[in-house]
Image (cartoon, helix red, strand yellow):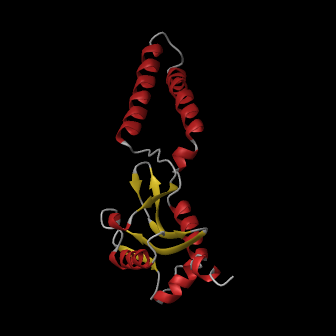
Amino acid sequence: MPFDALIAAPRQKSLSEIFDELGLTSVSATSLVDHKRAQLAKFGPSFWYRHQAALSIGLIVASPAVGAMAGAAQGFTPHSSALAVASSFAWMCMVALIAGTGLIKLRAGSHWEERFITADQLTETRVPEPIARIARSVTRKVPEVDLVLGELKRESVVLDPYLLIEFGDERVCIGVWDGDEVIACAQS
């Protein structure tokens, strides 16, 4: 039909075509996966956190054992019971002091979280300017893209973020940073 071309929807460009038009090369998916894996290993749970059950059992068993050893050292005489109780109490106080002051850190492991942000939120989420500039140029060219902020979190602390652009079923990494240091950034 002669009017089919007038009603046909224009073909949607892919992210790779948009990046080619802007003269950008994204951070490779392999380097992002390797970085995420390395950061999870680096910020994994502490030795004490991984062995909480053994540590708890050891501390529970150790208190009476210290008392029994102190009693055995005195030959279990009638006066040894006070020494056993006092040494067991001293042991429990020492364990409480060590745990209470944080000398034994029961630091949990870290995990990655992703959330959608807008181009207006790039500054408030502290995305470094070179990465934010690329994100803004892509969102100006194609307003339908989604920006995905990935954050490595341990408890409530953000350790190592990255920024993805999502369009349809495509995802492209445009930057990885740590504080003010840009680790990887899409190249123009």
- In this view of the protein, which residue sits in the foreground, 99 or 180? 180
Q: Position of residue 88 (x, y in %)?
A: 45, 24
- Image quadrant in which you'd find residue 170: bottom right
Asked whether, in this view, residue 149 is left or right of residue 53, the answer is: left
> Going by the picture, which residue comes out furthest to the left?
124
Q: Position of residue 23 (x, y in %)?
A: 48, 90
- Taking the spot 54% from the left edge, 28% from the top edge, the residue there is 60
Asked whether, in this view, residue 115 is left or right of residue 180, the answer is: right
- Taking the spot 53% from the left edge, 23% from the top edge, the residue there is 64
Q: Position of residue 147 (x, y in %)?
A: 46, 66
Q: Position of residue 22 (x, y in %)?
A: 46, 87
> Going by the picture, which residue comes out furthest to the right?
1
When the figure is inspected, residue 39 is found, relative to residue 136, above or below; the finding is above
- Taking the spot 46% from the left edge, 68% from the top edge, the residue there is 162
Name the image quarter holding the C terminus. bottom left
When the figure is inspected, residue 167 is found, relative to residue 85, above or below; the finding is below
Asked whether, in this view, residue 7 is left or right of residue 145, the answer is: right
When the figure is inspected, residue 131 is found, relative to residue 147, above or below; the finding is below
Res. 10 in view = no
- In this view of the protein, which residue sits in the foreground, 110 or 136? 136
> Going by the picture, which residue comes out furthest to the top?
78
Name the image quarter holding the N terminus. bottom right
- In this view of the protein, which residue sits in the foreground, 143 or 128? 143
Res. 23 in view = yes
- Taking the spot 58% from the left edge, 31% from the top edge, the residue there is 57
